[in-house]
Image (cartoon, rainbow, N blue to C red):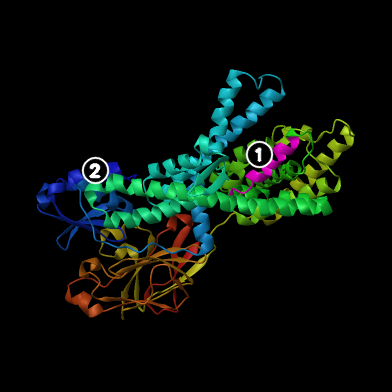
Amino acid sequence: MGKYEKLAQSIVAHVGGKENISSLTHCVTRLRFVLKDESKADDDYFKNVDGIVSLIKSAGQYQVVIGNHVPDVYDDVLKVAGLSTNENVEEVKKPFKEAFFDLVTALFMPMLAVLTGSGMLKGLLSILTFAGVLSTKSGLYTLLYDAADAIFLLMPVVIGYTSAKKFKIDPILGVVLGAALTYPSLQNAKVTVLGYTVQATYTSTVLPIVIITALAAWMTHRLNKIIPDVVKTFLVPLIVLAICAPLGFMVIGPAANFVSNLLLNGIMSIYAISPILALGLIAGLWQIMVIFGVHSIFAVTAIMTLATGNPTPIFAGQFPTTFAATATVFAIWLKTKDQKLKNIALPAWISGIFGVTEPAIYGVTLPHMKQFVITCIGSALGGMYLGLTNCLVYQMAGMGVFAIPSFLNPKGNAGMTLINVAISIVISMGFSFIATMLTYKDEKAEDEEILSPMNGEVHPISEISDPAFRSEAMGKGVYITPTDGKIYAPFDGTVTLLFPTKHAIGLTSTKGTEMLIHCGIDTVNLEGKPFTAHVKQGDHVMKGDLLLEADLDIIRSANLSTDTPVLITNSADYKDVLEEHTGMANTSDAILKLAV
């Protein structure tokens, strides 16, 4: 059940119970019930309860106005009432950049508070052990460290949950797939299947579980269509687990290992020729390798080298990444006016000082790709200086500032080594901080004039007959009484919503303005007969492109209004939505202005 389960239960109860519902559909803003007996519904409830905008009785329907999130409420009402639907709404197809950041947000934002808290706890433990307050051999330290490290070590389990929610399958299935990948006896163990041997580890990885969950979602959605309801509740997860868990472990791990070995062998070959270039590559690519889960072989190789009593350049190359990421996040924290981002960045840069940079990467820099690239460049510069001065790691140590002693060579000049390490830190942090201060800007919509999408007479939305639109609950705007039925794109952007009945279309401009054009009042009841779509959901459109055509005569013959609301659904993102024009207008006239 979704997050609107309680509201859905209340709605069903106050329309007279599920036995009083003949049918249920929804349009862009409202649930449309056909009730067997409207006298059993509690009108006063729907007019006064939080979460419901208003109640409208029209065209034989009991219309509960919800708002832009009506599809989510609709899904939960269906489940509560035990109803089914044949509605097939296309998924929004987003541009790659937008889809990537949407995925990153969906995967990491739900865990970010706990991820940051865990990082802070690891940093605190580092301080306490460094100061001699707490021994690393004590039971308390072990318990606290394990608690702090759990989310990092078992990242695939958490990502399994968030990615399953993103891909719209049972989150518990995602958790189990993540747990299967990180099952202790399988980590770095030789597993042979059909004569094919794999040795891989998936702890602390991100990409493998995302790929596996995406495959599981693809299978789940198709299996649900062909397997009978009576057995699908257990048969679908059985099939998905039996295929996805082994396939993911046997295919993705070797692929990651193959890439890791190529990188490791290539970089170590370069190191024999140029330590400067090699450490620059390790430092510059380290965060990317962590995200794709191909850094493990580097870490294992470095640990094995240290175990033999020899120094390693690998951890030396990894060292500057912590400081570059911390400096960038600190700069963003100073510059941003976005309070939500500032609240994320503060603990992220504090934990980053002690080497815990996952909150910084996943919560701050990765969603701002330019700044992520800056951290990679800053890291590379710091690594190149370590290579230039032949700084190597001689022993295992902590992270962040606590990794500094690992560079001390028992037989070398400790003072000069510390100076070179400090210069490396200054280079990586200095570049990252300055570059971020110069380039970072909070993302926000700019002032934008909105052209009329139709030829006709423009009126204030406060004068429209429909109370839901008149209340501006769906957004501020105007309505147009059209002289013809053609609807054009008022700006360059993307079609983010095209209702199956084609009576309403949602657009998002390249500047971030979200618009709803709703052709006529209650025209959803005509089941698409008057409308012809010239675009589909996900299409990119240019200003002036023909979007829809409506046969106004069919609408009028059904005794319905042709008045067309043109609403800015993200009005709250602007200081004001101003009427630029009323009266007769054509598609070259600006009818709205958005004040930032």
Q: Residue furthest front?
A: 195
Region of the chain picked out in magenta, as a range: 293-306
Residue for point 50% across, 47% down: 249
Please tell me how crowded label 2 is: few (under 14), some (14-19), or many (20+) other residues with Cα within 10 Å.
some
Figure label count? 2
Q: Is residue 172 above or below residue 140?
A: below
Which amino acid does the dot numbered 1 rest on? Gly
* Residue closer to the observer: 310 or 422: 310
Would residue 417 be visible to someone looking at this image?
yes
Mark 2 secondary-structure assignment: helix
Which corner quadrant of the image does residue 175 belong to?
Answer: top left
Q: Residue at x 76, y 47 (%)?
A: 428
> In this rendering, which labeled residue sits more in front, label 1 or label 2?
1
Task: Give the image location of residue 457, x and y in percent.
Answer: 34, 76
Residue 142 % position (x, y): 59, 23
349 left or right of 505? right
Residue at 55 percent across and 43 percent down: it is 202
Residue 78, placed above or below residue 185:
below
What's the residue type where badge 2 is placed? Gln
Residue linked to disc 1: 352
**Whole-percent x, y for residue 253 in the image:** 55, 49
Main SS, magenta region, reads helix
Neighbour class for label 1 at 10 Å: few (<14), some, many (≥20)? many
**Mark 2 = which residue?**
9
**Relative depth, front residue between 468 and 436:** 436
Q: Is residue 91 left or right of residue 293?
A: left
Is residue 585 toward the left or the right of residue 230 in the image? Answer: right
> Which dot marks residue 487?
none
Q: Of the residues under marks 1 and 2, which one precedes in the sequence?
A: 2
Q: Secondary structure at mark 1?
A: helix
